[in-house]
Image (spheres, helix red, strand yellow):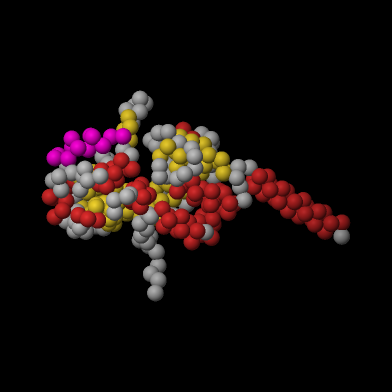
Amino acid sequence: MHTNKLIITALCLGTSLAISQAKAEQSKPLKVCAAENEMPYSNKAGEGFENKLAELVGKALGRKIEYVTWTDPRYYIRDTLDKGLCDVAMGVDKGDPRVLTTQPYYRSGYVFISREADNLELENWDSAALRKAKRIAVVPGTPPEVMMRAIGRYNDMFNYSQELVGFKSKRNQYIKYESSKLVSEISSGHAEIAALWGPAAARYVKSSTTPLLITLIPDDNVRADGQKVGSHYSTSMAVRKNDPTLLAQLNKVIEDNRDEITEVLEDEGIPLVDEPDAPETS
């Protein structure tokens, strides 16, 4: 009998300790690595769509969101998440080897942007409009640049591409191209076509006073040597490799709040595509 009482007491103490630990964890803010000024993703004023999604996560976990901002996308994982300054990074590529990534919370792709009035036939990189256009706006280092080389339009667009630089940092000469500026090239008529990452451009296409068309680029592009050039990518949240507990919590949040997450993305105007391994629905 005495032994049973000891077991019951130990179980009660264990349960009480677990509850106390859970409450303590919930009272701590969830620190999110966020860009200081990388719109439309996030900024210090919390105006980006990733800010909205972070707040959704915080609400689902019952934790206040606290942002730890960064300015250079090349080093933010190393300088913030890895150093324990924040707990979660939004907008990370699925399977990024530097971190543990959640199941994707959306998948999108690169898009062609043109003026509605121009009525251009833009279906893929073989479209005749791409060979006739005098100016095509792309961001260097992205799949559209690779495809511009593949269709023989890279060299004659090189000087124009340099005009589109929106920012140059003093630190290692980091170059930044503003999506808003590239979309405005189309709305103003300075360029005929832009090929941009859909989530980065959608807000500015939607808010343009000049009616614009956005066409999702198919994910079947290849270079001259036959190697595939991806156009559709899945986006996840990330945690440190030693934090599988938080990873599991975030996966549950994504699973339980899929409709709310999709609503934020659709309100932004982001073109969404199904995960390649998603089951077909009737």
Between residue 17 and residue 169, name the one nearer to us: 169
Quadrant of the drawing holding the N terminus: bottom right
**Front residue (pair 237, 197):** 197
Left or right: where 156 falls relative to 139? left
- Above or below, 279 against 99 in this view is below
Outermost residue toward the top?
Answer: 170
Q: In the image, what residue occupies the spot 73% across and 53% down?
A: 15
Q: From this viewpoint, which residue is outermost toward the bottom?
A: 282
Q: Quadrant of the C terminus?
A: bottom left
Magenta part, dominant SS: helix
Count of marks placed on residues? 0
Report the residue at 32% width, 50% height from top: 209
In this picture, residue 146 sits left or right of residue 105 = left
Image coordinates for residue 266, horizontal then vertical, percent: 41, 57
Residue at x 49% of width, y 42% of height: 46
- Picture coordinates of residue 211, whole percent (x, y): 29, 54
* Rendered location of residue 63, percent (x, y): 61, 47
The picture places residue 5, in percent across and down from the top left corner, at 84, 57
Q: Residue lying at the far right in this picture: please name it.
A: 2
- Work out whether residue 15 or residue 175 is closer to the camera in this orientation and state it: 175
Residue 142 visible from this viewpoint: no
Residue at horizontal 26%, vertical 37%?
164
Does residue 177 belong to the magenta stretch? no
Q: Is residue 28 visible?
A: yes
Q: Quadrant of residue 128?
A: bottom left
Magenta range? 155-166
- Quarter of the image holding residue 168? top left
> Relative to residue 247, is residue 277 drawn left or right?
left
